């Protein structure tokens, strides 16, 4: 390698470290957890590995662009998504920087077109038994923010995280981390006449710690506890949460792959007229393959989410999704999936959740099916159909049905 190339690489490493330091001084929101891919990079330049990708996503026809229950409007749409992950090895240490952008296009509803951007980084120090890390993310988007809000709303989400792992033995480690985040909506973004900026702008602080134990080279269990504090400008939705949850992690080389955590959460609103919630919480996803032909992917979560609706500022979201991919012959496979979201509104002033009243509820069901073709490593084409139906007896204005005929082309990692 020439001296100029070495200087360029060293410059990239120094710039990356400067970015990390700058982000630590900047209050932020969506926790970035970057991990280096296991496969070899498409582009390698000394200690620098690059993983670029490009996707033509959801190209097709949407029968209900605005999820309207009275007058559904159809349109043709697609999303161009590009991503790039750079991984630099600094001895035993690792610096990862990720960038991405999306361009969302509609044929007739030009006002729905948008450009989104995401930047994230993480720096892992691994030179000793004490392994500190720092990370940050910055996302500007106009995607629908939650399962409850059907409007595409512009917002900025930022986060910064720092923590450490301390190896006690070859199998056991102590963990600790702190994450600071914020979410800010653009002025004028509304849903059903409610200002999303006034309702949902917020800052979060989450402190967590625990113990990890490697049962086998492919399976790790952990016990974690966390404390979260959410602050809103109007203070109506201010709340604290306490969570204790065991975690199981499976290596990508294991028969079952993924991560799942389940435990108990206590959610305590600041407003004394809103009832507290103590109950089961879980989050994660696992997948496995049978006979090298059939792959199952299961994802589930149960957590308290913030509502735009002042009369009931929180709801309990329960979500489960199953996807099945079946190889047919050669590079061709069939894809089928089903998803169910359950929104339970159980927080009203002056009433104790689960005792004084029956919660209001909303259900969203999604069914998908399609055909995928993998032509070579990193090049895949999927053609699919999707049907979504939302029903709610207490909120008929939010009921809708939607059919989408879509295709996705992926190039790269």
Image: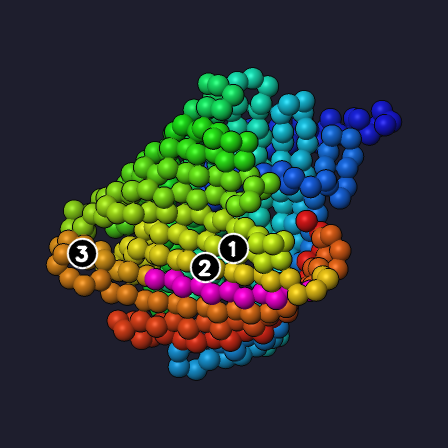
Which image quarter is the N terminus in? top right
The disc placed on residue 281 is none
Distance from Cα at disc 2 to Cα at disc 1: 8 Å
The vertical placement of 83 against 58, above or below, is above
Residue 66 seen anywhere in this rendered image of the structure: no
Which residue is located at x 46 percent, y 24 percent?
A: 173
Badge 2 is on which residue?
321
Residue 256 seen anywhere in this rendered image of the structure: yes
Mark 3 or 1: in front is 1
The answer to whether the residue labelled 2 contacts the one labelled 1, judged by CB atoms less than 8 Å apart, is yes
| Residue 60 image position (x, y, % from top left) | 62, 73
Asked whether, in this view, residue 27 is left or right of residue 112, the answer is left
Q: Residues within 10 Å of mark 3 (few under 14, many from 20)?
A: few
Badge 3 is on which residue?
354
Label 3 vs 1, first from the N-terminus: 1
Query: Is residue 263 on the magenta stretch?
Result: no
Secondary structure predominantly adopted by residues drawn in magenta: strand
SS type, badge 3: loop
Distance from Cα at disc 3 to Cα at disc 1: 32 Å
Q: In which quarter of the image is residue 193?
A: bottom left
The vertical placement of 92 against 200, above or below, is above
| Residue 41 image position (x, y, % from top left) | 73, 41
The magenta stretch is 332-342
Q: In which quarter of the image is residue 40?
A: top right
Mark 2 or 3: in front is 2
Badge 1 is on which residue?
297
Distance from Cα at disc 2 to Cα at disc 3: 26 Å
């Amino acid at each position: 390698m020439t001296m100029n190339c070495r200087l360029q690489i060293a410059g990239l490493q120094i710039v990356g470290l400067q970015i990390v330091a700058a982000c630590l001084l900047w209050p932020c929101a969506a926790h970035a957890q970057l991990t280096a891919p296991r496969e070899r990079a498409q582009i390698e330049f000394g200690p620098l590995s690059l993983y670029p990708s490009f996707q033509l996503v959801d190209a097709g026809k949407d029968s209900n662009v605005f999820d309207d229950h009275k007058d559904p409007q159809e349109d043709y749409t697609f999303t161009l998504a590009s991503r790039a992950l750079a991984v630099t090895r600094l001895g035993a240490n690792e610096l990862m920087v990720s960038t991405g952008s999306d361009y969302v296009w509609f044929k007739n509803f030009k006002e729905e077109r948008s450009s989104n951007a995401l930047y994230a980084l993480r720096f892992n120090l691994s030179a000793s038994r004490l392994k500190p890390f720092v990370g940050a993310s910055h996302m500007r988007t106009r995607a629908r923010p939650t399962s409850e809000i059907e409007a595409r709303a512009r917002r900025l989400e930022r986060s910064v995280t720092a923590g450490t792992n301390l190896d006690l033995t070859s199998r056991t480690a102590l963990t600790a981390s702190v994450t600071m985040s914020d979410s800010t909506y653009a002025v004028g973004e509304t849903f059903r006449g409610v200002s999303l900026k006034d309702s949902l702008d917020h800052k979060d602080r989450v402190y967590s710690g625990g113990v990890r134990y490697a049962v086998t080279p492919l399976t790790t269990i952990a016990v974690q506890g966390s404390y979260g504090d959410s602050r809103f400008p109007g203070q109506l939705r201010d709340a604290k949460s306490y969570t204790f949850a065991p975690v199981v992690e499976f290596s990508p080389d294991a028969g079952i792959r993924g991560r799942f955590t389940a435990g108990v959460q206590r959610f305590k609103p600041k407003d004394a007229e809103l009832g507290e919630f103590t109950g089961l919480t879980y989050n994660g996803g696992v997948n496995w393959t049978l006979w090298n032909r059939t792959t199952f992917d299961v994802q589930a979560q149960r957590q308290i989410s913030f509502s735009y609706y002042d009369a009931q500022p929180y709801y309990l979201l329960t979500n489960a999704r199953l996807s099945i991919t079946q190889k047919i012959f050669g590079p061709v496979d069939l894809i089928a999936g089903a998803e169910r979201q359950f929104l339970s509104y159980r927080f009203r002033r002056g009433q104790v959740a689960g005792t004084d009243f029956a919660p209001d509820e909303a259900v969203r069901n999604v069914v998908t099916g399609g055909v995928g073709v993998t032509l070579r490593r990193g090049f895949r084409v999927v053609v699919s159909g999707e049907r979504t139906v939302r029903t709610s007896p207490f909120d008929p204005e939010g009921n809708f049905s939607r059919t989408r005929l879509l295709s996705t082309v992926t190039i790269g990692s």
